[in-house]
Image (cartoon, coloured by chain):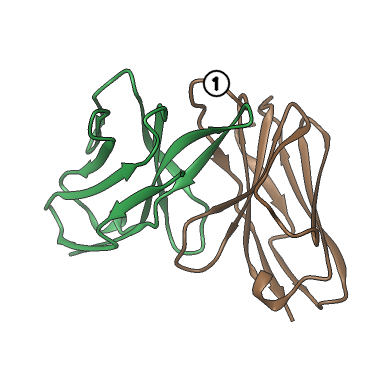
Chain colours: A green, B brown
Amino acid sequence: GENVEQHPSTLSVQEGDSAVIKCTYSDSASNYFPWYKQELGKRPQLIIDIRSNVGEKKDQRIAVTLNKTAKHFSLHITETQPEDSAVYFCAARFLQGGSEKLVFGKGTKLTVNP
Amino acid sequence: DTEVTQTPKHLVMGMTNKKSLKCEQHMGHRAMYWYKQKAKKPPELMFVYSYEKLSINESVPSRFSPECPNSSLLNLHLHALQPEDSALYLCASSRRGASGGETQYFGPGTRLLVL
C-alpha cells in the first residue's frame, strides 16, 4: 500500500547544531519527494524537494538525500536557528487512477533551543 | 499571483447547517486538491481534481461534496457534518495532475468547527 514512515516524531537541538529527519516509502515507483515546513497555525510551505533522477539536492542550509534502492530519503538542516522550529513533513508521490497524490509522513516536531 | 487563497479563514457550523469552502488560484495550475488536517497530524488527502474533473476521491463521506466550476476555483460543500469533522481544511494546487511530480502549493486553510 501507500505508506510513508517518518522519524523521529520529535527532535530537539541546540542552535547551531545539525538536524536530520528520515523517511522511508513503500512504492518503488514513487519519483518525487517534497519536504514541507509547517509553523503553528500556518499552511505547509515547501522547503525543498527531490526527484528520483538525483541523489542529493542542496539549498543553503537545507539538503535532501535520496536512496532509491533503499526507498529512503532524508532532510538535513545545518547551523539550525530558532526560526527553524516547526513541524516538518516528508511526502512521496504515488500514482492513482492516472492522477498523482502525495502521501505524507506523520511529521517531526523540531525545536531549536537558543 | 503566486498564491492559493481560501475563504473563509474560520467557520463555525451546526450539524444541520450547509456551508461551502472556497479555494482560488490564478497560477494556471490544472490540478487542485482538498486536504483535511487534524491537530498534530499530517494533511490527509480528500479529493483531487485534474483539468476540472474529479480524479481521486479518497472514500470521503458524502456529506463532503467537492465542485470545480473552472480551472481557478475549487469549492467544498458541507452538509450535515459531525463534530469529528472539525479540522483545518487545506486546498492545494499544482501545475499538472499526473506527470513527473509537480510541486503542490497550499492555501492558508479554513479552520472548521462543527458544534
Q: Write down the residue under mark 1.
A: B99
Q: Give the residue at x 29% y 46%.
A: A23
Q: At label 1, which amino acid type do we have?
A: Ser
> Measuring 45% from the left and 64% from the top, which residue is drawn there?
A40
Locate residue A94 relative to residue A63 in the image: left or right: right
A23 relative to B64 in the view: left or right: left
Toward which corner of the image does residue B24 lie, by quadrant?
A: top right
Kindly identify which chain the residue marked by label 1 belongs to: B
Q: Image height check: is A111 above or below B101?
A: below
Q: Nearer the viewer, residue A4 or B25?
A: A4
**Left or right for A107, reference B82:** left
Query: Which residue shows up at 42% across the image and 47% down it?
Result: A3
Quadrant position of residue B111: bottom right
- Crowdedness near tag 1: few (<14), some (14–19) or many (≥20) residues, C-alpha within 10 Å: few
* Coordinates of residue A79 in the picture (x, y in percent): 15, 47
Q: Which quadrant of the view contains residue A113? A: bottom left
For image coordinates 28% across by 35% down, the residue present is: A71
Q: Is residue B49 above or below residue A110?
A: above
Residue pushed farthest bottom? B115
Q: Using residue A70 as the reference point, say whether residue B73 is left or right of it.
A: right
Label 1 element class: loop
